Amino acid sequence: MSSKEPKEDIYTRHASSNLSELAKSLAEIMNPEGKADVLEDVLVLDASLGNFAGIIAASLFAEFGAEVIKIEPPEGDPARQMTPFGSNVQGVGIPFLFEARNKRYLTLDIKNKTNDRLTFGKLAHKTAVVIETFPAGDMDSWGIGYRQLSQDNPGLIYIAITPYGQYTDKAGQFARMPDADITAQAGSGLTAEMGDVPNAGEPYNWPLRAGMWAAWYISGLSAALAGIVALLFRQKTGSGQMVDVATMDAYASMVGIPVSIGYTWEKARPRIGVLDFILYPYGHWRCKDGYVVIAAPRDHDFRALLKILGLWEIEDDWRYSSDRIPDILDQATHLHKLIEKETTKYTADELVRMALSYSKKSARSKWRGGGVPIVMKLMTPEMAMENKQWQIRKTFQEVEDQKLGKYIVSTNFVKMSASPPHVKWVSCEIGQDNEYVRNKYLREE
Amino acid sequence: MEDYFSYTAKLFNPAEAAAKPEALQGIRVLDFSHVIFGPVAARILADYGAEVIKLELPFFGDLWRPATYWGKYWKHSNPIWHNITKNKYFLSVNLKLAKSKELIYKMAEKADVVVENFAPGTAETWKIGYSQISKINPQIIFLSCSTYGQYGPMRYFPGWDLLAQGASGVLSLNGYDDRFFKLPDYLGDFVPANFGALAVLMALYYRHKTGKGQYIDIAQTEALMRLLPNYTFHSITGGKIGRTGNTDPTMVPAAIFKSQEGQFLALACATREQFQGLTKAMEREDLLSDQRFKSNWERLKPENAQILNGIVTDWVKSKTLDEIIGLAITHTFPAAAVEDDYTICNDSWRRARGSVILFQDTMYGELMIAGPSAQLSSTPSRTKWLARPLGYHNRLVLKKFLGLSEEEIKSLEKKKVIGTFDDRPGLKPPVYYNLAEDPIYNYGKEAKS
């Protein structure tokens, strides 16, 4: 081992001392421990079944301190078994463990048992938020839909999550169609935009699934966001309302870009592999020891990148200097390969240092035009966990449960000085809080 | 009892949305942000009724104004920009001048929320950071957006959506063994922006109860990390989920397939019931008694998953898209066509629902934009106007919100404290648009006869 500086140090830049002081005090101010639970007075019933969009929305409420009661039949929510390659801890899948944040577990089979529906109705009477993912109209036909529950509880916020929503003809025709992440990714426009270029051969040029539950997370996040909007309105007026999330909206509605392009261009974009529709260079390249991510899209950033990589001779070539927009695929791919030829000569850390030292000089020089090419080492999730930045920011938390043992979850996704989200417990056994819920909410008065 | 869908059709009727109350009415937001992450967080607040005042530099404006796909402009504006920044007031002030800061401080007195996404430390250096604004207004909710956060050794690193995808691990997950792709359309900005808005709304809820404001530090990398159970998978198994092409390893079968006529579609079985439905549709109920596919746990094993996905691939190849969707409804398993830019904006149900809106704008005329990803029955999100040229609301904001006179505004213009657009597309109005007769641009000026 050479006596070089520790690895992370290349990512440390120094600023004036008063800003460093500020950052130090921020780390203390943002410590989530002992902070207020903003939703402590909010009771949430999560009746979602086999659908992680509902579970995720419920988790977000629970992380902000709401009392969340997860309702599932005696055999458990089938979502417990949705897990990569079947990996599980005592029959509980990894995604379910990951989302088991600060929740209570009550056994009720509202899909099949009339009595359990009555119990649910009693609970819902005291509830601020209901989340459900049954086929549109099922809860209503069981007498526990928004229409019925809101009569006794006008402040109720009722969140329904389904593929095609609660209204329109299509919602009626497709009401029985169950939800899955991959179908919602496909149906909301995400997969069509991912995948390799048309001549890459099959299956690489096919629409590609995002390698995570993109549609379910977008839908769950959208549901929670709409839920807190509704809670704010309820705080002011006392009135509840119904919230309708269609997972087939997830991607297109969140980014909006497919709609704008489909309308103004009157056709769909082709798949363009690693390129970007607006910016270039804006992607990842192979290097000696893995991959780097490079963003140098503005003209002065791009020129700086050429200098750093020793490619200055192509600067006055019109193809690269003034027209890097990848509408001519061959041209953009050619440039991509020219850059790759250079990046593969260096390690990721070397490339990061080269870009950094240029940017530092560039910031002070009127001759360098202020170009800031951003180069970073590409991380896998497993590598990212080890990064000092996230240790300092407590992004990952080791949780422990008597039955499930110890494991790590990503948490503290936003730092708030007064009312941050935080994970307090993760236990999630079926029916573990039956007694607690009955004593607290279902005692006859 | 009334039919459920006729009840919900009335409850959510998009034609009535504009007349319904707004949950964030009376909330004022100062939006110092640029590009996508900060602006979208602020726009979500505007969509629910907050007054969002967006600050930009005169004659320069937001970096993203001219950034359209393949350089294609629409009516001299960036069509994508209309989705990112609608419903806002566009004020163009030169932040570098002391006089501008006076204006900002005065606005901050009555603001509820500030949103910024400069490189960490910049807002403080320019004296518009939380430590300065909270002195003027202790109840302020101040949202700082960045790629790596406001503290920690990486804080000064610049970053965009792409860098957050690269730093969280998201970028490494999409694709095949030998190649992978980023999430498109700057999803690494849009998702964190929604988390940012969520945090602001939580802070408003808290302030309403306690009277206290707060500081919020959102790092887009951390927001993306909230979406990945991969870390938990690694800590429990020691292995990694990695890339699995276009199959979903959490349910089997689950993949993208090609139909008889060459249409792409996704099909999945998330539960045992759904798998039973699929085997019925395939007339392959024998699969249910096959040891390899009997239970969820068996089907999820990679070797069995590969075989079953193969069997389904062949079956899908023998059917048309419409046949598969029909069977999926009858036998209740998830299936959906792969939709793209064009099909999404032409789906009639999305328009009926209000997920896709053909919006009539007073400046730009008709443009199709995306509706919200959640519909609320009493306080729906709505679009009131599209993006506007740089500095379009200077007069309205300074007169209505700050009580400045026409003379004071003229003097600010002369001193270049405030300004407007130059001739670049993305900054200016459509060339045929007559600004001289626009009552908002000329707010409070004497009408020309």
Image: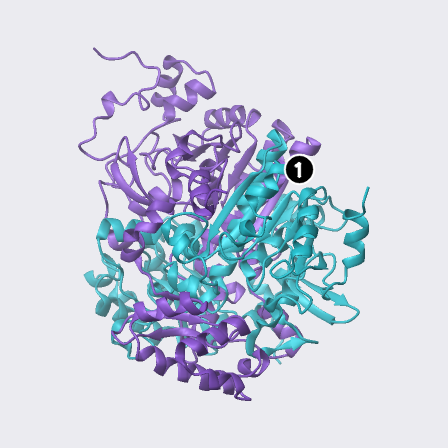
Chain colours: A cyan, B purple
Q: Is residue B157 visible?
A: no
Q: Residue furthest front?
A: B1
- Residue at point 27%, 56% (across, down): B342
Which residue is disc 1 drawn over?
A: B206
SS under mark 1: helix
Tell me the quarter of the image containing the C terminus of chain A: top right
Q: Relative to B374, is A427 above or below? A: below
Tell me the quarter of the image containing the N terminus of chain A: bottom right
Number of callouts = 1
Residues B242 and A152: in front is A152
Name the image quarter holding residue B297.
bottom right
Indicate left or right for A367 with B218 as reference: left
Across and down, in percent, residue B94 comes to: 41, 31
| Chain of the residue that carries numbered disc 1 in the rendered image | B
- Residue at point 54%, 75% (across, down): B241
- Residue at point 38%, 70% (across, down): B327
Q: Relative to B272, is A145 above or below? A: above
What kind of residue is marked 1?
Tyr
Indicate left or right for A71 with B92 as reference: right
Residues B277 and B139: in front is B277
Residues A334 and A308: in front is A334
Across and down, in percent, residue B132 comes to: 60, 33
Across and down, in percent, residue A118 comes to: 68, 51
